[in-house]
Image: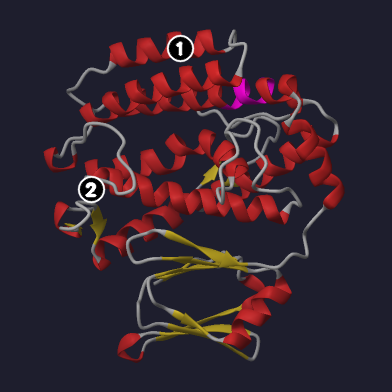
Amino acid sequence: MGVTSLAQIYITDNKAKIGIQKGRIVINQTKNLTRSIPIENVEGITIIGNGQITTSCLGECLKRGIAVQYYSSKGFYFGKVSSTQHVNTNRQRKQIKLTEDQAFSLRLSKNILKAKLNNQIVVLRRYQRTSFSNVEEEIKQMAILKSKLIYANSAFEVLGYEGNGARLYFKGLSKLIENPNFKFKGRTRRPPRDPFNSMLSLGYTIIMNDIYGAIEGRGLNPYFAFIHQDREKHPTLASDLMEEWRAIIVDSMAMSLVNGNEIDISHFYKNKETQGVYFIDDGLKIFIKKLEKKMETSTKYLEYINYSTTFRRAIDMQIMQLCKAIEEENPELYYPIKIR
């Protein structure tokens, strides 16, 4: 279980019980360990596994707009409990109207996915500096795709360039992994087939659902998107906005864990029935602690501000920029995050 100074709470202890006493969130764990934090400082609660939360605590979270998210012990997202106090129907009407505007959606898609390719290229270059492996060919081909993407005439073409870029990127990323136990042959999901994919899958799921909550907090509808096609029960707008963050937050964090020897192959196990690979409890704790540290890292990557902000705050600011672009019906007002 981890609690940050900015009060994003993660519960990984299956026997933990979360309650509220005198205005403080109280977490009772095994071995008589109890921790607490003022509820006004709590931003969200994520329960991974079988931890429990009292009805009175849940009710207070709803009053204060604090979302409570639930994941299985394997990292599958079940859903969340959240307030509807931030719903903005006028903003959502504009959003839905613009998802049907092909020119707006295409321009926004190009901007976001071009930034995604840029960020992937930068991550490859960073890790190549300290590696004996050469990924210049992958970087070269990705740069060509990035230059062609701006001439795409449809969302289908844009996604085609992005998909080809992703295959090259993960090929290059695997070459840069120093520990042979974490090598992989490309993205696998549902279930992840190796430890590195397991880290990517859980990281992407958590970040996407953080984005989901931030989208709702700004009055938008997470289920109406500009890049991805509508999918039953899937928050496609969160998938859209996730794209620019994947390499920056999750991929680079997974690489740091592996190449920095912070995590070991023994922190994972294979499910015999599904052949999926998942964290054991100790591995999950290492991963969550690293992810939360990453989210609280300050950055100056947002080009429309001249001061540092955490990745968590930057995600919310990006959604505010999207709200502005929607309200003024101008996709150029949205500036995807691009690392250098």
Q: Amino acid at mark 1?
A: Leu
| Local crowd size for mark 2, using a 10 Å CA cut-off: few (<14), some (14–19), many (≥20) | many
Is residue 151 or residue 4 the one in the foreground?
151
x and y, in percent, of residue 90 in the image:
87, 47
Horizontal side, residue 161 vs residue 138: left or right: right
State whether the magenta stretch is mostly helix, strand or loop.
helix
Q: Is residue 324 visible?
A: no
Q: Is residue 161 above or below residue 36?
A: above
The three-letter code of the residue at mark 2 reads: Pro
Mark 1 or 2 closer to N-term? 1
Q: Position of residue 13 (x, y in %)?
A: 35, 76
* Quarter occupied by residue 272: bottom left
Q: Position of residue 186 (x, y in %)?
A: 27, 32
The residue lying toward the viewer, choosing from 165 and 224, is 224
**Alpha-carbon span between mark 1 and mark 2:** 29 Å
Task: Provide the residue designation for mark 2.
Answer: 195
Using residue 88 as the reference point, say whether residue 280 is left or right of it: left
Point 28% across, 46% down: residue: 192
Q: The magenta stretch spans which residues?
A: 107-112
Colour scheme in the image?
secondary structure
